[in-house]
Amino acid sequence: MKVHFLGTAAAEGFPNPFCKCQACVKARELGGRNIRSRTSVMIDEVLKVDFPPDTFFHATRDGIDLGEVQDLLITHTHYDHYNPGDLYNRIEGFAHGINHPLHIYGNDLAMQGIMRELPHSQVGKRFVYHRVLPFKQIETQTAKVTPLLADHDQLETCLLFYIEKDGKNILYGNDTGWFPEDTWEFLKGKKIDLAILDCTGAYNGTKRSRNHMCIETILEVQRVFQEESILNEGGQIIVTHFSHNSGFLHEEFEEAFTPYGIKVAYDGMIINL
């Protein structure tokens, strides 16, 4: 299974194009893995998680044919994860040679927003909409997916995803702070080959941060994974969704996580499970 990290930054990108903080100035100077676009991943080029404003850039930078994507999972409707207006470019007359509809899965807000943005005439032709509920497994065109509850925006049912595909299990755990208890209960007894976790902050002095994770929270999640034997042998934790407000560049995050065997994602990174 191929997992492609398209973007790895928080909402503002890294560097924030308007910001003159030390981290942003250094990121511009150093370039490379310090330049991060808004977070999204692609699995086997057919399943995509989130649709950020940088999706056009991701496709052109990495030579991705988005017309091949069959399933799109939406975690929540914050602007760095959800840009439904650009899906208009997939309608008939704009995109040619498309022979299957894109199935889109998300909460109530996500589905309502997409229906407002896209022509109703395209339903069933270029798009199929699926409202999903926490802990109710769905079978998409490409995988089995169970939406889980996140601790993020208290006014929206934000979702994480447990993805089962080709004998491998992926936890897409972003955006969230410390997982809600119902999500922990679901994960106990499960096996994960890859956990993709939110590391918006650096060292925040708390093991169980709210809304987003920091380095200490990631290490606490790893500890519980080990105690509950949730990670398969050889299973990996990869952190993503970095904010310039962390003050940390790519190398500094690597220094923090490498001793624990945790990998730091960067834009364009590909791993094979």
Image (cartoon, rainbow, N blue to C red):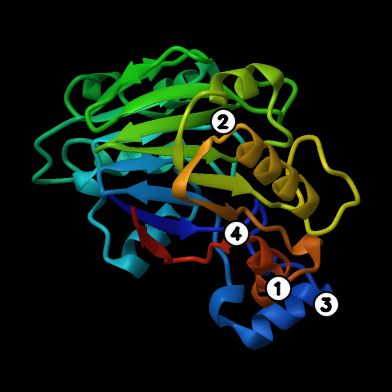
Distance from the alpha carbon under mark 3 to that under mark 1:
19 Å
Disc 2 + disc 3, Cβ < 8 Å:
no
Of the numbered discs 2 and 3, the one sitting upstream in the chain is 3
Q: Residue at x 48, y 56 (%)?
A: 54
Question: Callout 4: few (<14), some (14-19), or many (20+) C-alpha neighbours within 10 Å?
Answer: some
Circle 1 residues within 10 Å: few <14, some 14–19, many ≥20: few
Mark identifier at residue 262: 4
Relative placement, left or right, of 53 versus 251 is left
Residue ID at (75%, 22%): 154
As rendered, which of 183 and 93 lies closer to the eye? 183
> Is 256 placed left or right of 132 in the picture?
right
Which callout, 1 or 2, points at the residue further toward the start of the chain? Answer: 2
| Residue 24 rendering spot, x and y as whole percentages | 74, 74
Distance (Cα) linking label 1 and label 2: 31 Å
Task: Say few, some or many: other residues with alpha carbon within 10 Å of mark 2 (under 14 / 14 to 19 / 20 or more).
Answer: many
Q: Is residue 77 visible?
A: yes
Residue 87 position, x and y percent, is 35, 39
- The reply to whether residue 175 is in sight is no
Left or right of 252 on screen, residue 166: left
The secondary structure type at the circle numbered 2 is loop
Q: Amino acid at mark 4?
A: Ile
Q: Earlier in the sequence, mark 3 or mark 1?
A: 3
Q: What is the distance, in whole Å, between disc 2 and disc 3 at their CAs?
A: 30 Å
